[in-house]
Image (cartoon, rainbow, N blue to C red):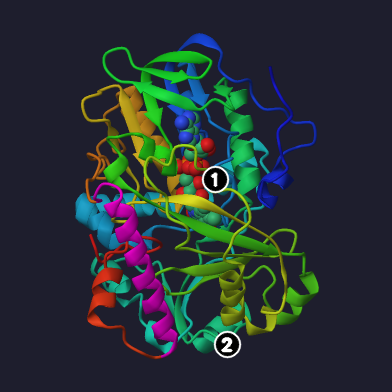
Amino acid sequence: MTQATRTEGRCPWLREAIAPGECDAPALTGDRRADVCIVGGGLAGLWTAIEIKRRDPACAVTIVEADICGGGASGRNSGMVLSQWAKFAALTRFCGIDGALRLAEAFARSPGEIAAFCQAQGIDAEYRQDGWIWGASCAAHIGSWSGILDSLEAAGRRPFREVSREEIAALAGTDAFYAGIHDPSAGTIHPGKLVRGLRRVALAMGVVIHENTPMTRLVRGPRPAVVTASGTLRAERIILTLNAWSLAIRELRDAILVIASDDAVTAPVPDRLERAGYLDKPLISDSQTFVTGYRTTGNRRINAGVTGGRLGFGSFRGQRFEGPSLREAAIRASIARGHPSLGDIPLVESWYGPIDRTRSGLPLFGCLPGSSDIFYGYGFSGNGIATTPIGGRILASLALGTSDEWSGCGLVRAPERWLPPEPIRYIGAHMVRAAIARQDRLAYAGETPGFITRRLAALAPGGITTSDAT
Ligand SMILES: Cc1cc2nc3c(=O)[nH]c(=O)nc-3n(C[C@H](O)[C@H](O)[C@H](O)COP(=O)(O)OP(=O)(O)OC[C@H]3O[C@@H](n4cnc5c(N)ncnc54)[C@H](O)[C@@H]3O)c2cc1C
């Protein structure tokens, strides 16, 4: 039985994207079969399904989703579509220089390819290529990007341009940043319309979707299956694209740290944006370890976000990280720091969602140890929009058994085991989080954190950039 898609309690992106009268896809009932079953209907799962169908239209693909497609992080993010050049050092460690360049270039093409895909498929996802400024909002942060520029320079690539305070003012209407770098290829998108548009395309291509169907058990071994409360799906191959919920998979539990990002929007403020010189201008992020950033939306709101929120515990089973954010003050402070003239605009709504951070900040893919027909893609680490389409290609190649540049790339590797078991992980993560927050605070006061704070903060997993811990 289908039910009207719930909009109540969902963030504005999803409310705007869910059409009136839209219904959920039917839940799984009884015993079913598929060639490929994808568990998790976010961006990663949907791009993978679409890619498999594109390559092999006869392949029977089913998506099993606990909530609705896009109900996880994919419909709740800030819609910043960023290349991965800032993680080039980590890419090089995993893939060597040539492999890193190939992947970094693929990630860099991704924003344009998403825009072209949306246009071809009639998805009005409000993509705007306004560029990205990564700035220093205090003196201590000036040059945070130097190491990245050096490693890119050594590889002969210059995707970023260093920009002065005056140049940032000309680009974005604010002289609050001391300096920064500018990537003109980045953009913004409406996350709700993107993910719900992908769902529509997947359905039109013949992908079977079961929503409100949490997998309760994964059957490993020669006849893999996804067991749910009211049915079982047997498949030749199973792909797990579960983001934070990968913690429920014992083989992946030590590989990711789950931590929330929090977002909020103002009401539409076109006149204020116009006066501030920030209409259709670059998205902006700062250089804190717990990075904060903001952008404008198609309907002229400011959408801002902060990282480093609530921590996930244990297997994360039953946890959804839904509801209003408790960090609205930090979100407003981030707008006020970057654009002081916009800092008084009230936030009208806030929310938060879970992020699956790997140590490097890069997504990883592979085959579940001991189960040659079960594949995983996890760790999009807060940068999933531009990386999930590439992840979809990697997972499609793995699941279809195709030997190519995707299945052979350096991001295909065994799950990393870098985190301790609970409750040590949860307690330790709180300590590291507190140290990072302290380090970020002290930077604005012009003070240097002590040895212990620095050592603990250095354990942070990757976010927009790669981590010192890798
Ligand atoms: C507040 C916030 C802001 C962000 N901002 C940005 C940004 O500006 N730019 C950017 O690139 N990225 C951003 N991200 C990150 C981005 O949203 C993610 O990297 C991306 O959505 C990951 O896609 P996914 O498909 O892996 O995860 P998800 O969209 O979370 O999909 C996983 C799906 O699995 C489902 N699931 C879980 N358990 C089960 C189960 N047992 N059975 C079946 N299904 C299950 C979930 O319901 C969910 O729909 C942000 C994230 C958040 C939370």
Q: Position of residue 438 (x, y in %)?
A: 39, 77
Residue 307, relative to residue 13: is it above or below? below
How many residues crowd mark 1 within 10 Å: few (<14), some (14–19), many (20+)?
A: many
Between the C-alphas of marks 1 and 2, the distance is 33 Å
Residue at 62 percent across and 58 percent down: it is 128
Q: Nearer the viewer, residue 126 or 239?
A: 239
Q: Which segment is the magenta one?
A: 419-445
Residue 288, relative to residue 213: is it above or below? below
Count of labels shown? Answer: 2
Residue 37 in sight from this viewpoint: yes
Residue 394 in sight from this viewpoint: no
Q: Is residue 230 part of the magenta span, yes or no?
A: no
How many residues crowd mark 2 within 10 Å: few (<14), some (14–19), many (20+)?
A: some
Badge 2 marks a residue whose secondary structure is loop
Q: Position of residue 265 (x, y in %)?
A: 68, 63
Ligand 1 closer than 8 Å to label 1 CB: yes
Image quadrant assignment for residue 461: bottom left
Image quadrant assignment for residue 55: top left
Q: Amino acid at mark 1?
A: Ser
Q: Position of residue 408 (x, y in %)?
A: 24, 37
Q: Nearer the viewer, mark 1 or mark 2?
A: 1
Q: Position of residue 126 (x, y in %)?
A: 67, 52
Q: Nearer the viewer, residue 455 or 204?
A: 455
Q: Which residue is mark 2?
A: 175
Q: Amino acid at mark 2?
A: Asp
Q: Is residue 434 part of the magenta span, yes or no?
A: yes
Magenta region's main secondary structure?
Answer: helix
Q: Which residue is mark 1?
A: 74
Pointer 1 and pointer 2: residues touching (CB < 8 Å)? no
Q: Nearer the viewer, residue 449 or 275?
A: 449
User: Could you tell whether 39 is left or right of 89 in the image?
Assistant: right
Identify the residue at the far top of this view: 31
